[in-house]
Amino acid sequence: MAYYKFLHSQHINLLLEGRFRFGRLRYYQLLEAVTKNQWIGDMDEGCAINFIDHVVLQAGDGRDAIRSRLVEAGLTVAADASLTLYDSCTISHLDCFVFSVSRGELNLLTSSMCSPDKPDYAYDACVRISGLRHLADAIWKEGVLCHNGQRVSDAFCPPNNRSSDL
């Protein structure tokens, strides 16, 4: 399966010149709420839900591994605090900058992303991306932020090259 970047045709020359639009994740989360349509926006994008069946911590009990796992779930418990949780969950929302691409069969993606039934939000252009790792490395090494001329490598963390999907 290939990767594709869907966009509006008036922006295609910018992309082909190497200029990329990074959007805030919060924008895509709110897009679904505003449009009442999940075809492009997703309120759960960047959202982590962690279910907790039963946890009991006592002050000074030395269960640092459990406290660390709770921190990963978005809940910090001081070493001198006690906590009891039953049938609970934590919900964490990220807000960061993202460069959205789609992965799949072009005809299926096009029917969703370029649907004439959604003229206010549908895209009318698409570029195939030959490799995400190569793209991420190029953006990191050569990219410049349009609004202030700052290098991408000075403004953001390096690309995560651990994923086998890249």
Image (cartoon, rainbow, N blue to C red):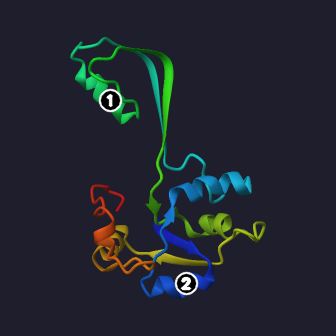
Dot 1 amino acid type: Arg
Q: Give the class, few, some or many, for how many residues have Cα within 10 Å of label 2's Cα (few <14, many ≥20).
A: some
Q: Give the class, few, some or many, for how many residues have Cα within 10 Å of label 1's Cα (few <14, many ≥20).
A: few
Quarter-of-image position of residue 67: top left
Q: Which residue is mark 1?
A: 69
Provide residue 143's location: percent of width, then percent of height.
35, 78
Dot 2 amino acid type: Ile
Along the line of sight, the residue nearer the viewer: 90 or 124: 90
Tell which tag, 1 or 2, sits nearer the viewer: 1
- Residue ID at (50%, 85%): 14
Q: Is residue 94 left or right of residue 125?
A: left
Provide residue 33's location: percent of width, then percent of height.
69, 51
Q: Which mark is residue 12?
A: 2
Provide residue 43's location: percent of width, then percent of height.
60, 48
Does residue 3 appear in the picture of this structure? yes
- Residue ID at (47%, 86%): 16
